[in-house]
Image: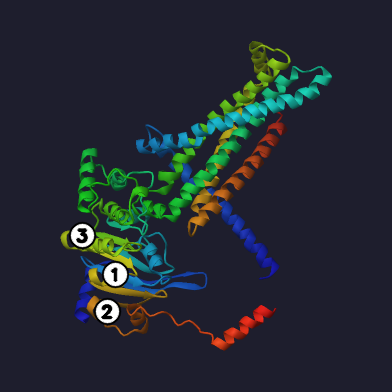
């Protein structure tokens, strides 16, 4: 094969990748209403609730703990610098703004990605290997509606909730630090926090967490569906799912942050 | 023979015409023609890599052939709309090789799934149908178990129970006796005969197990390297003189190129010295 052919082949593979991602996303979007309670099928909503436990509720301890630690680290690190300028109070702003805009959604997304992207890829990959996906199709049930859509909806609901909770954990860790070092009261601390963050920041964070949630399930499902061959292929797909979703989350975060600053949303005025 | 084959063509529930398929340069199916007649048990034999699984995937509309047509109950599933395909699939029950039971559901729920999703039957009716199926397949004690808790034979029977749930006209079984001990496998053969004789279901069995094939089959078809090399009533098939069929029936291994002893020794010594 000539070099040109190899380049072309690689390009085709990449374009096919993007195409598959988009097609699957569209297919799921169309099926999403079927999963909703009341308007959709009750049974899908039931499996969505199960998925909400698997993706969201069980990730809470880990996401919360990671945010607590990171909040404390952030406060410690910044305090040692800010103390030199006599501006220790600014730790509040730093922790509050840092967590609301950036660390809350990112830490949540990374912890969910590590847990759930692999779990989703493994579950769906196993269903491919054991012909369960084929069985669904042959029975006339759409695997997109039956297995994928509940996971999407569950992630879209739980990841923003988790983000709010882990942001609160991070901000609370900042309080714990300041309570010890400056004997700041809870009341004053949270008033300062409320002054530091804007509603716009919160909206931005929630929008970001929706994007992250989509990346996690989307990559997990696609890697699972791609499994060909035996059980060892499932292992590869879980690794690929975590690696790809983690990378895409950071990339999406970079893009979102760049847009946020370019649009001038960061200024308080 | 010509009379009966003309009658068969009229009577065909599934008719495959000129189906070909390749993966890259490898031809997996080569101009396959096959009819499955109403009410018969047709066994599709073939070794590993003969294209059995690929043909099955095409029959179920999970893959599209490059050329040729597959007509089931008068509908060409290679060219019909998704809703027509859905209607055709409703009349077919499939038991996959590993059972393909959903691990997160009990056996009872697995069997109830197609009824719940695709019919408007009341819950009490569904429960009744499920239990009738489970009892008919000897699984009355296993309803509340989960697939990982089942033995191999039970899993296959549960898969058949699920395939039977919507009262299909055609039942397709992929390797029903693979990995089962002879007693369980014989039980499954009896079950297949029972379903065919008492409900008149057309059954297509894909397998490489000769004994069970000849026990249950009305007709036997054999695939070799993507080609259908014989389709015949089992009595005639047993007498077929095609070298591949003889090899398959007589269980003879493929010739492996042998190395002469002194040549082997010389090569071995060279390996040791370097």
Give how far across and how far down residue A15 sits, in percent: 60, 55
- Give the mark, 3 or 1, whose residue is nearer the N terminus: 1
Is residue A25 in view from this perspective? no
Chain identifier of the residue bearing label 2 in the image: B
Chain identifier of the residue bearing label 3 in the image: B
Secondary element under disc 1, as helix, strand or loop, is strand
Secondary element under disc 2, as helix, strand or loop, is helix
Which mark is on residue B43? 1
Q: Residue at label 2?
A: B237
Quadrant housing the N terminus of chain B = bottom left
Q: Is residue B144 left or right of residue A165?
A: left
Crowding near pointer 1: few (<14 within 10 Å), some, many (20+)? Answer: many
How far apart marks 1 and 2 lie (CA) works out to 11 Å
Secondary element under disc 3, as helix, strand or loop, is helix
Crowding near pointer 3: few (<14 within 10 Å), some, many (20+)? Answer: some
Give how far across and how far down residue A4 sits, in percent: 69, 66
- Give the mark, 2 or 3, whose residue is nearer the N terminus: 3
Residue under the point 38% across and 35% down: A46
Q: Is residue A56 left or right of residue B15?
A: right
Which mark is on residue B195? 3
């Amino acid at each position: 094969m000539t070099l040109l052919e190899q380049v072309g082949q690689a390009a085709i593979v990449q374009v096919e990748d993007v195409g598959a991602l988009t097609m699957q996303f569209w297919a799921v979007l169309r099926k999403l209403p079927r999963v909703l309670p009341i308007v959709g099928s009750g049974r899908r909503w039931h499996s969505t609730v199960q998925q909400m436990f698997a993706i969201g509720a069980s990730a809470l301890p880990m996401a919360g703990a990671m945010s607590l630690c990171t909040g404390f680290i952030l406060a410690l690190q910044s305090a040692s610098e800010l103390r030199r300028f006599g501006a220790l109070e600014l730790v509040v702003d730093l922790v509050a703004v840092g967590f609301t805009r950036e660390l809350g959604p990112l830490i949540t997304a990374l912890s969910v990605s590590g847990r759930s992207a692999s779990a989703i890829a493994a579950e769906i990959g196993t269903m491919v290997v054991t012909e369960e996906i084929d069985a669904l199709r042959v029975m006339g049930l759409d695997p997109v509606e039956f297995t994928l859509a509940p996971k999407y909806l569950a992630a879209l609901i739980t990841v923003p909730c988790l983000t709010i909770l882990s942001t609160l954990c991070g901000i609370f860790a900042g309080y714990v630090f300041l309570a010890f070092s400056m004997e700041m009261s809870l009341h004053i601390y949270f008033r300062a926090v409320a002054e530091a963050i804007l509603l716009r920041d919160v909206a931005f964070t929630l929008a970001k967490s929706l994007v992250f949630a989509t990346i996690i399930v989307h990559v997990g499902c696609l890697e699972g569906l791609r499994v060909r061959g035996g059980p060892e292929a499932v292992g590869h797909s879980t690794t690929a799912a975590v690696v790809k979703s983690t990378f895409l989350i950071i990339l999406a975060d970079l893009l979102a942050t760049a847009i946020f600053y370019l649009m001038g949303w960061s200024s308080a005025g | 023979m010509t009379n009966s084959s003309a009658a068969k063509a009229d009577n065909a529930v599934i008719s495959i015409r000129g189906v070909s398929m390749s993966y890259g340069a490898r031809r997996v199916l080569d101009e396959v023609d096959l009819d499955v007649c109403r009410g018969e048990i047709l066994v599709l034999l073939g070794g590993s890599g003969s294209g059995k699984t690929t043909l099955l995937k095409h029959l179920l509309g999970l893959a599209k052939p490059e050329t040729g047509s597959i007509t089931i109950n008068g509908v060409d599933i290679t060219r019909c709309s998704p809703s027509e395909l859905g209607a055709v699939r409703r009349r077919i029950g499939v038991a996959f090789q590993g059972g393909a039971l959903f691990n997160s559901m009990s056996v009872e729920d697995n069997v109830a799934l197609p009824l719940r999703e695709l019919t408007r039957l009341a819950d009490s009716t569904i429960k009744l149908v499920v239990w009738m199926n489970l009892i008919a397949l000897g699984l009355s004690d296993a309803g509340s178990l989960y697939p990982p808790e089942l033995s191999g034979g039970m899993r296959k029977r549960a898969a058949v129970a699920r395939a039977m749930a919507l009262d299909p006209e055609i039942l397709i079984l992929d390797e029903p006796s693979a990995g089962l001990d002879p007693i369980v496998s014989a039980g499954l053969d009896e079950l297949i005969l029972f379903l065919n004789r008492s409900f008149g279901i057309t059954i297509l069995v894909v397998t490489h197990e000769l004994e069970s094939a000849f026990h249950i089959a009305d007709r036997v078809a054999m695939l070799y390297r993507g080609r259908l090399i014989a389709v015949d009533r089992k009595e005639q098939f047993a007498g077929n003189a095609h070298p591949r069929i003889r090899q398959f029936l007589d269980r003879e291994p493929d010739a492996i190129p042998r190395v002469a002893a002194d040549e082997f020794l010389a090569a071995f010594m060279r390996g040791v010295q370097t």
